[in-house]
């Protein structure tokens, strides 16, 4: 048995070629064991290499994103710029870790064979609540770190940079679509879009970031309808005005 284990270890260490050298000597069963170990080992190495590649690609993408956002802040001090870039990049990594850890826990809960459907649903809900609490805590700490180096206006730019500037774009669109909005209505729209942005900043993907804005746009649209606006007509009239501007014809 010791001799067999030695051969297996050597085969795993040196690959298929070593295993082939022992094929004539040992039984078909033994050969099969060696082949299985080689396949498992190769798969493990490939998986590890894949994870390393994914991690490297993710880190590069995060750093590039952080550099782009920091580059829009007008920071002239190189050391300060580097520090802000690092804070933003670290936030992306922290958020990713929180979301991935929560997904793993939820997946484990759903695979349970001892819990009832109701218990699984309750456990998943509890995990989501715990994740939201951690995200809120991380969000607060992140903004505090940024505020140590940036002005409130620069912090706003970071928030917009992390959410594809959906807030200013959408806020401007509502004002263009309905020019007669009152100051109170504008304030309400802006407040809800700001709330949407805070959630979107912590979301795990671009799709989820846009989902948050979509959710709050629905709330805004319901609010404007309750305020007496015909949004369908307002949108049609807005489209006509934009087309008239493009063609140069009178609106």
Image: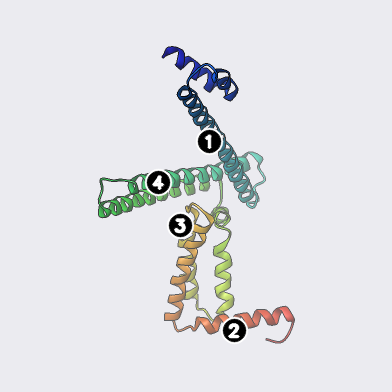
Find the distance from the CA under tag 1 to the CA under tag 2.
Answer: 56 Å
Q: Is residue 170 above or below residue 14?
A: below
Find the distance from the CA under tag 4 to the CA under tag 3.
Answer: 17 Å
Q: Is residue 189 above or below residue 197?
A: below
Instruction: Identify the residue position indicated by label 1 in the image.
Output: 47
Instruction: Identify the residue position indicated by label 4 in the image.
Output: 102
Looking at marks 1 and 2 on the same chain, the residue that comes earlier in the sequence is marked by 1
Q: Tell me, for residue 225, which label it has, or none.
A: none
Looking at marks 4 and 2 on the same chain, the residue that comes earlier in the sequence is marked by 4
CB within 8 Å, label 1 to label 2? no
Under circle 3, the secondary element is helix
Instruction: Give coordinates of residue 7: x percent, y percent.
Output: 50, 16
Under circle 4, the secondary element is helix
The 10 Å Cα crowd at callout 1, few under 14, some 14 to 19, many 20 or more, is few
Q: Quadrant of the C terminus?
A: bottom right
Q: Residue furthest bottom?
A: 250
Given this view, does label 4 or label 3 mark the residue nearer the observer?
4
Q: Tell me, for residue 199, which label it has, or none.
A: 3
Find the distance from the CA under tag 3 to the CA under tag 1.
Answer: 33 Å
CB within 8 Å, label 3 to label 1? no
Under circle 2, the secondary element is helix
The one of 171 and 156 positioned closer to us in this rendering: 171
**Relative side of 251 to 234, left or right:** right
Given this view, does label 1 or label 2 mark the residue nearer the observer?
1
Instruction: Identify the residue position indicated by label 2 in the image.
Output: 237
Q: Quadrant of residue 79?
A: top right
């Amino acid at each position: 048995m010791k001799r067999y284990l030695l051969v297996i270890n050597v085969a795993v260490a040196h690959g298929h070629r070593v295993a082939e050298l022992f094929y004539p000597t040992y039984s078909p069963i033994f050969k099969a064991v060696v082949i299985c170990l080689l396949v498992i080992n190769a798969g493990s190495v490939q998986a590890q290499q894949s994870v390393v590649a994914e991690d490297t690609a993710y880190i590069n993408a995060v750093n590039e994103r952080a550099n782009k956002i920091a580059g829009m802040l007008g920071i002239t001090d190189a050391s300060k710029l580097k520090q802000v870039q690092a804070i933003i990049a670290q936030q992306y990594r922290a958020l990713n870790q929180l979301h991935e850890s929560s997904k793993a826990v939820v997946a484990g809960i759903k695979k349970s064979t001892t819990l009832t459907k109701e218990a699984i649903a309750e456990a998943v809900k509890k995990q989501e609540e715990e994740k939201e609490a951690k995200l809120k805590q991380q969000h607060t700490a992140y903004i505090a770190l940024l505020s140590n180096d940036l002005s409130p206006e620069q912090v706003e730019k970071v928030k917009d940079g992390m959410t594809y500037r959906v807030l200013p774009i959408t806020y401007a669109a509502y004002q263009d679509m309905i020019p007669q909005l009152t100051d109170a209505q504008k304030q309400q729209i802006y407040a809800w879009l700001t709330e949407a942005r805070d959630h979107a900043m912590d979301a795990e993907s671009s799709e989820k970031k846009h989902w948050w804005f979509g959710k709050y746009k629905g709330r805004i649209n319901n609010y404007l309808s309750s305020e007496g606006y015909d949004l369908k007509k307002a949108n049609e009239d807005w489209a006509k005005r934009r087309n008239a501007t493009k063609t140069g014809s009178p609106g």
